[in-house]
Structures are given as structure tokens and as C-alpha cells.
Image: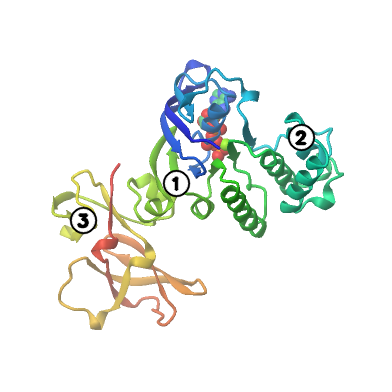
Amino acid sequence: MARLDVKHLAVSYNGKNKILNDINLTIEDGELVSLLGPSGCGKTTTLRSIAGLIRSNQGQILVDGKDISRIPVYKRNFGMVFQSYALFPQLTVRENVAFGLKNQHIREPDLSSRVNEMLDIVGLLDYAARFPSQLSGGQQQRVSLARSLVTHPSLLLLDEPLSNLDAKLRVEMREMIREIQQRLKLTMLFVTHDQSECFAISDHVAVMNKGVIEQFDSSESIYHHPLTEFVAHFIGYENFFQVKKFLKNQKYLLDHNLEFTAADSSPNVISLTIRPEDIEIIEKETENSDNHNQLEGKILFSTYLGDSYRYQIDTPLGIVIAVSGTDKKYLSGQPIVLNFPSQKVLGLSK
Ligand SMILES: Nc1ncnc2c1ncn2[C@@H]1O[C@H](COP(=O)(O)OP(=O)(O)OP(=O)(O)O)[C@@H](O)[C@H]1O
Ligand SMILES: [Mg+2]
């Protein structure tokens, strides 16, 4: 197993515009890190640079502290699951999975038992004799996963390995990947643009935007404390209030001379955000006189989510989204007051 350090990595295709800019990333031995970001932000390029399939313009890639740039790709003992499966079309499912083990000179009966075990894990034992062209996209993706896991690589690079699976299989497979990763203590870099997937599976998450990593933190920190507007948007925060001025001690001036207290205190904060479920809805009659961190509003619209209601509320700061329990339902047109607990109001920078 191995620890990976990426230091100041920069890549530009055909020497022109920079696709990656000063990427820094550490994956501790036996850890799973996700690279999360929108289409085109440079996730695949980062993965391919680490694998050695793309030449970087700048920076270092270290495995256990050693620069690997001079080690040829085939000697690195990295596993890779490509976004496009990249199976050998002329080999059966069984032969595809056995390929890496044969290269490692693993012999029978070990060979067959490891291949069978892996095919069983990904649910494809009955398909062992088929060729890739006779499989669905999701089945090919699972063969690709089995092929890369079976050799127990020191570092496994996975490029959206679950993108072609249906919702139920996706959840099962991500649990399977996490389970195998923890059991075999594999070091993994997992690319996805699905936030729930990345939180479910990772120790740390790197959120990428336009070729840079905007935030690299534990899953919990990213979820509860995004630092920039981009990260907050990308992981599903919906309420944003523009800051007019930083006052002092966590206090910010918003539009309409409203003053809000947030969890953070910084002059670099450009907007405040809060999760819909952290906003409290109070009936107008029970409103108390202290209107700090409160907004008056009117319910516009509600949707039933099964375990809660989701409301669109018209306020002086624009439409606010709030989610609250099913014990009480507010009706369209009803005037209410929203309370924003200051420890749940986060300050975001650019
Ligand atoms: N061979 C290439 N030559 C020139 N530009 C490229 C090449 N490959 C990718 N790019 C560009 O580099 C940028 C990053 O691409 P990349 O494939 O790394 O994105 P990604 O984050 O993996 O996106 P997706 O989620 O769609 O897979 C994109 O703007 C893309 O158009
Ligand atoms: Mg990609």
C-alpha cells in the first residue's frame, strides 16, 4: 500500500491554456479521497497525470515520498478504472479479470479462485464466459472494477466507475468499493461529480473548479462548512445572501439594512449561506420582539418530501428555501417569520 502526494501539478494540452493549475493533494496510506467537480473541471486530466498517461508541465507526484515521474506506467502497480471501461474486446469477462493476475505470474488454482471471488463480489459469475460486446454498460463497468481490484494495486484510480449503473446498484456498488477498500487497506482516488456518492465513500474530499482545488477537507467539513460560494453551490446549499459589509464579531450587514450574525468572522466573507433544514419557521403570532437573525416572509409554495415539507418563501432578501418536519404544514400565502440560528449561518468567500 502507499501514500500519494501530488505537489504543484500543472497541465496544459498542446502548451496553451492551463487545464490544471497548481493541484496539491495528499492521500494517506489506506485512505480513500474523492475528487468532486463539474464536467470539464479537470478530474480525468488529474487522474491521468497521476497514472502517468499525461505528461505534466510542472509539479511532482510522489509515492511513499519518492518521485515516480521516471518510472514507466506499467511498472507503477497502479490500478485504473477508466470512464470508458477500456475492456479487452477479444477477451471474455473471466479473461479480462484474470489479465493482471497473469501478468503478476499468479498460477492456478490461486488464479481461478481470485477471479471467481471477484466476479462473485461484482455479481457477474454467471457472465464469466461472455465477451464485453455482449454486456450492458453497467455490466462492463463492473468487469472493469473487478479487473482493477483483483490485483490489489498499491494505488487505485477510479474515474466515475459507477456512472452507468441504476440508482440501486450504484448504492450497492459504492458500499462494495468502500468495503473492499477498507478490508484490503487500499489507497484510492475516486472521481465523481455526484456529491452524495462522494460523501458516502470518502475519508477526504477535494472539490475542483476550473482546474484548481477549491477546498480539500474531510467529508464532514466539506458538508458542514464549505468555504467558498462555488463549493457551497456544488454540494447543494441553496440560500445565499449577499454581504454588503463586514461589521465586527461575526456580524454582517445585508440588503435592507438587515444585520445577521454568522458562525464565521472575516472581512473576506462575500455571502452568507444556511442549509434549508437549519432554518426555523415560526408562526407570525408567536413572534417575539427580538428580530435579530430573523426575516419576515410569506409561504409561496410547498412540496411534500415524505419525511418533511420543503417551502419556497418570499422574503425581503429574495426567495428562501426552508425544510421543516411534517408535524405542521404551512399554507401558501401564510405570513411567517424565519429564524436563522447564528451557529448555522456560514460565511463564504470568493
Ligand atoms: N486531449 C485533450 N486536448 C485538449 N483539451 C482537452 C483534452 N482532454 C481534455 N481536454 C479539456 O480539458 C478540460 C478538462 O477535461 P477533463 O476530461 O479532465 O474534465 P473532467 O472533469 O474529467 O470532466 P467530465 O466530468 O466531463 O469527465 C476540458 O475543458 C477538456 O475539454
Ligand atoms: Mg472525466
Tell me if residue 93 can be seen.
Answer: no
Residue 31 falls left or right of residue 280: right
Say which residue label 1 marks. Answer: 204
Q: Which dot, 3 or 2, sits closer to the camera?
A: 2
Q: Measuring from the top left, give residue 20's x and y in whole percent.
A: 45, 28
Using the image, determine if residue 304 lies above or below residue 135: below
Which amino acid, mark 3?
Asp
Asked whether the residues under the numbered discs 3 and 1 touch, taking CB atoms below 8 Å apart as contact, a structural biologist would say: no
Residue at 63% of width from left, 35% of height from top? 80
Please rate how many residues cluster around mark 2, counting C-alpha atoms within 10 Å: few if below 14, some from 14 to 19, many from 20.
some
User: How many numbered dots are placed on residues in this image?
Assistant: 3
Q: Distance between the residues labelled 3 and 1?
A: 36 Å
Using the image, determine if residue 297 lies above or below residue 112: below
Work out whether residue 116 or residue 229 is closer to the camera in this orientation and state it: 116
Q: Distance between the residues labelled 3 and 2?
A: 68 Å
Residue 222 is marked as none
Q: Measuring from the top left, give residue 59's x and y in whole percent.
A: 43, 22
Residue at 33% of width from left, 45% of height from top? 228
Q: Would you say the beta carbon of the disc 2 residue lies within 8 angstroms of ligand 2?
A: no
Marked residue nearer the N-terminal end (1 or 2) = 2
Marked residue nearer the N-terminal end (3 or 1) = 1
Which amino acid, mark 1?
His
Asked whether the residues under the numbered discs 1 and 2 touch, taking CB atoms below 8 Å apart as contact, a structural biologist would say: no
Q: How far apart are marks 1 and 2 (CA)?
A: 34 Å
Please rate how many residues cluster around mark 1, counting C-alpha atoms within 10 Å: few if below 14, some from 14 to 19, many from 20.
many
Using the image, determine if residue 94 lies above or below residue 8: below
Residue 255 is marked as 3
Say which residue label 2 marks. Answer: 106
Q: Measuring from the top left, give residue 185's x and y in whole percent.
A: 56, 45
